[in-house]
């Protein structure tokens, strides 16, 4: 199989039963993609996957995708979100600054799902954020800081894109 992961092309022989999360962690060293439940219930293993380098990537739970299904695809892991200079993505920065994590186990998947949500909906309501992250479970927090972080990241991303902000927003 051949797959682009975080901007690098990897060609490898893969056992047809290997899950994408296993391939990312064990063969490619992308250990930021966490194995949480192996049942696709928790979302900790969420990555962004598109049909190819120029395709729009969407969040997928990598424990429910066979590695061979990623053949020809482009995958972004939590490690691949940072800028080339190591600067954090707006969502990563907001999670850090607004303490949107406690133990941190769910954080990579939450961040990846939030990135996907904000690409599709750059100005979500609190309800839309909660719905957009509903496939990701956090066992430690009450989700308040997670929602605040996504709202803050959304504002930052809109500002970076030059979208005018509402007065008083």
Image: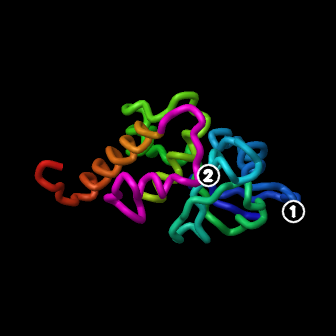
Residue tagged 2:
46
Which mark, by number, is residue 118?
A: none
Q: Residue at x 67, y 41 (%)?
A: 34
SS assignment at label 1: loop
Whole-angstrom CA distance, mark 1 to mark 2, is 20 Å
Q: Residue at x 44, y 45 (%)?
A: 83
Q: Residues within 10 Å of mark 1 (few under 14, many from 20)?
A: few
Q: Nearer the viewer, residue 23 or 39?
A: 39
The quarter of the picture where residue 66 lies is: bottom right
SS assignment at label 2: strand
- Residue 119 among magenta residues: yes
Part of the protein shown in magenta = 118-142
* Lower sequence index among marks 1 and 2: 1
Residue tagged 1:
16
Q: Is residue 85 visible?
A: no
Q: Nearer the viewer, residue 77 or 144?
A: 144
Q: Where residue 37 appears, x then y in whole percent?
A: 73, 44
């Amino acid at each position: 199989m051949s797959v682009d992961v975080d901007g690098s092309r990897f060609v490898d022989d893969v056992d047809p039963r290997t899950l994408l999360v296993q391939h990312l962690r064990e063969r490619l060293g992308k250990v930021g993609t966490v194995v949480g439940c192996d049942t696709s219930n928790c979302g900790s293993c969420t990555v962004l996957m598109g049909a190819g380098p120029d395709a729009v990537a969407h969040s997928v739970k990598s424990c429910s995708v066979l590695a061979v299904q990623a053949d020809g695809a482009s995958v972004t892991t939590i490690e691949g979100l940072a800028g080339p200079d190591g600067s954090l993505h707006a969502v990563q920065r907001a999670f850090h600054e607004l303490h949107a994590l406690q133990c941190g186990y769910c954080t990579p998947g939450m961040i990846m799902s939030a990135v996907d949500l904000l690409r599709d909906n750059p100005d979500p309501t609190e309800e839309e954020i909660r719905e957009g992250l509903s496939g990701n479970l956090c066992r430690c927090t009450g989700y308040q800081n997670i929602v605040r972080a996504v709202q803050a990241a959304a504002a930052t991303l809109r500002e970076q894109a030059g979208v005018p902000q509402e007065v008083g927003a």
